[in-house]
Image (cartoon, coloured by chain):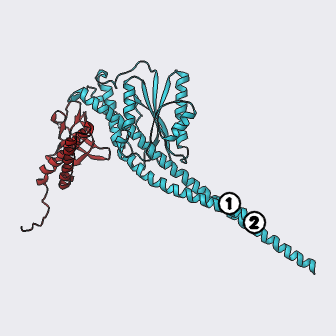
Chain colours: A red, B cyan
Amino acid sequence: MPKIKFKIVTPEKVVLEDEIDQITLPTKMGEITILPNHIPLVSSLKPGEILIKKEGREIPMVTSGGFAEFTANSLVILADTAERAEEIDEAEAEEARKRAEELLQRKGKATEEAIDYTALAAKLEKELARLKVARKYRRHRPPKPTIRLEE
Amino acid sequence: MPQATRDIKRRIKSVRNTRKVTKAMEMVAAAKMRKAVSNVLATRSYSRLAWELVRNLARRTDSQYHPLLEKRDQIKKIGMVLITSNRGLCGGFNNQIINRVAKYIRQQKEEVGIEADLVIMGKKGREAMFKQGHTVIAEFKKLDITNMIHEIRPLSNLIINDYLERKYDKVMIAYTDFVSTLVQKPRILELLPIESKVEDEYLGQAKIGDLKVEQPAETKLQSTELEYLFEPSPDEVLSELFPRLLEMQIYQAILESDASEHSSRMVAMRNASDAAADMIDDLTLMFNKARQALITAELADISGGRIAME
């Protein structure tokens, strides 16, 4: 079985470059899974989880949207942002989601410009995707030692 | 102190002050340059891949899917985006790109009779182009260092809309490619229509240190010349993708220019500081000689007087 040459880049850096067996992408229509020898494909992505499988291992990532191009067993993702699931700080993600939600509600009441509203909604969607992926893969990590105080 | 030495001393002082200024400017430019260079290097691989994707799409997709892909038979007018700096004192940075563009426009006019309109970023370009009597349709404020891609959105929207409205049949971008701190290359690239035939036209192709921007893999393309499958639909994907990736291309050109400007200014200021230091050395030598000559003359006078007395 041939492998897929995979590369995910954001405007800041190359996040991951690897040879992989399969990948699941969150497209505008829903999730799709790409296996080697797929026909050429161009797709726009929405915020969500990217799941890579390589030699039985799973590498979860999260993106906030972008484009994917697949040709001749080589997949390039041009992402707006992308993170490995284990790199997401859950507390920080939760914080960001709350901020976005709050802003969104305030905007909703005041009925401000529609542009701002959509931008905020998009931001919220991104943060939700991050949080979801972070939560989902939390159990794969060894738990952090915590000191619990008696109440 | 007699006239000769005093004059020299005064000159030394003024040159020393100038050196202080150029030294400070060098330092400022160096700090900005580091920022600009790290920006430009970070986005290079993204923008290169993005352009590759745009090219692949142009080659393999039916041009009816998107108006930006459409081939125009007759080119009547060119839109030219020129990226310069706001301030001078940066060596030949502005002159090089301005002369190149002016020459290009003149050539187009004389040889094929195609007029060109300019969209300018940076004060220096505007001043020069006005003086030469070219048509400037818009000027965008240039930031010292462009950080975010949305800062250039107005520019890219203007360009794309004008192209779609058929105001222009061709859009070029003139910027300065950042090769290294010492070498910058002015270039004029074709942005629109999106064509797939020219192979070497990537931005920031330069090599920097050990970071090599590899040449596009051509083998990848010949294996499958199939049309792409679009998800969700060609229309939806392309109308989102083309403006975004074109914007990225303009953004990258601006980043390249930023990095070039600041490195070019740093080098110019370093040269000025070095020249000032040399001048101070020369003048000090001259000053010492003049002082010595004065003393010798005085001594000769005194001993001459004594001999006369005896």
Q: Chain of mark 1?
A: B
Drawn side of residue A102 relative to residue B156, left or right: left
**Residue beneath disc 1:** B11
**Residue beneath disc 2:** B290
In this view of the protein, can residue B196 be seen by the observer?
no
Of badges 2 and 1, the one in the foreground is: 1
Q: Hey, which residue is sitting farthest left in the picture?
A: A151
Is B144 above or below relative to B302? above
How many numbered marks, from 0 up? 2
Q: How far from the left and from the top, in percent, is residue B119?
A: 46, 33
- In front here: B181 or B95? B95
In this view of the protein, can residue B98 be seen by the observer?
yes
Q: Chain of mark 2?
A: B
Q: How far from the left and from the top, in percent, is residue B296?
A: 80, 71
Q: How far from the left and from the top, in percent, is residue B101?
A: 52, 33
Q: Secondary structure at mark 1?
A: helix
Is B268 above or below relative to B175? below
Q: Secondary structure at mark 2?
A: helix
Dot 1, how many residues are within 10 Å of its Cα: few (below 14), some (14-19), or many (20+)? some
Snapshot quadrant of residue B252: top left
How far is mark 2 from mark 1, CA to CA?
14 Å
Q: Hey, which residue is sitting farthest top in the picture?
A: B73
- In front here: B4 or B58? B4
Q: Quadrant of the N terminus of chain B?
A: bottom right
Dot 2, how many residues are within 10 Å of its Cα: few (below 14), some (14-19), or many (20+)? some
Q: Residue at x 23, y 40 (%)?
A: A117
Task: Evaluate whether label 2 is on the same chain as label 1.
Answer: yes
What amino acid is found at the position of numbered circle 2 in the picture? Ala
Drawn side of residue A101 relative to residue B202, left or right: left
For marks 2 and 1, the one nearer the N-term is: 1
Q: Hey, which residue is sitting farthest front in the picture?
A: A110
Q: Residue at x 28, y 26 (%)?
A: B225
